[in-house]
Amino acid sequence: MQLDLAGKTVVVTGGSKGIGFACAQSLLAEGARVVICSRSQANIDRALTTLPGAIGFAADLTSEEEALGLVDQAEAAVGPIDILVNCAGAARRTPPQDLSPAHWRAAMDAKYFSYINVIDPVVKRMAARGTGVIVNVIGGGGKVASPIHLPGGAANSALMLATVGLANAYAASGVRVVGINPGSTETERVTEGLKAEAALHGISEQAALEKMVQRIPFGRMATAEEIANVVTFLSSSKASYVTGVIIGMDGASTPIVV
């Protein structure tokens, strides 16, 4: 299947590792011009050694000013952004008894505003040009509450609503906005979640891992590449009528229809 992504300008936030890195790899393989972003210049430099042809900029996307600076830098370097893939930011997983209001505020900054701060200027510029795609990699914690992921889940839930709301608002302007909710995925972020799960239940991290995998009907976690494959398809013209939806990718762990 030809995805018609050759020559498209793509920004992948959080593109230096994990799902974002896999998305950058997949989109590069389709001939897209890829810009990655991370808070860490060292992480960007490391990622670019295996992302031939990509470029990267360091920015803290919890800052509205730095997010706008990223958008301006990317467009100055490679041209107007055709596709935005948001993978940056993750809220810390914390057992409920250890939560404070500060944790909830930090989660909104880390996950919700790190997306919104980039989406806002990009979606408006896309609308002015009459074309564009935004894919938000969010997370199933926004749909099914987890005791160790309540602030992050609340941020994810807010992103889900923002995703479908923006899709509705900008469809007439030629912009598609789609969300993906990965379940447990083989990335570095899994380790943090396992530590919190182990602390909550008083078990080892290995036991927490085994419990997590047992809850997945597929019997394994997703790979970052599997998530990236769907992101790449959704970014393409082959998904031209897909917008305003949140696609679950959790191996049927939550078999619900709402």
Image: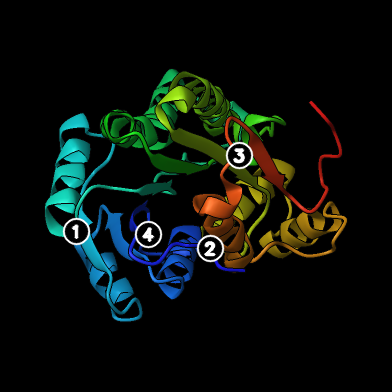
Tag 4 residue: 15
Is 92 placed left or right of 141 in the picture? Answer: left
Up the image or down, 214 lies above or below 59; here it is: below
Q: Amino acid at mark 3?
A: Tyr
Secondary element under disc 4, as helix, strand or loop, is loop
Secondary element under disc 3, as helix, strand or loop, is loop
Up the image or down, 12 lies above or below 99; here it is: below
> Which is more foreground, mark 3 or mark 4?
3
Q: CA distance from mark 3 to mark 4?
A: 26 Å
Q: Amino acid at mark 2?
A: Leu
Secondary element under disc 2, as helix, strand or loop, is loop
Counting residues from the start of the chain, the first of labels 2 and 4 encountered is 2
- Give residue 160's position: percent from left, percent from top: 56, 28
| Towards the viewer: 87 or 202 | 87
> Which is more foreground, mark 2 or mark 4?
2
Tag 1 residue: 78
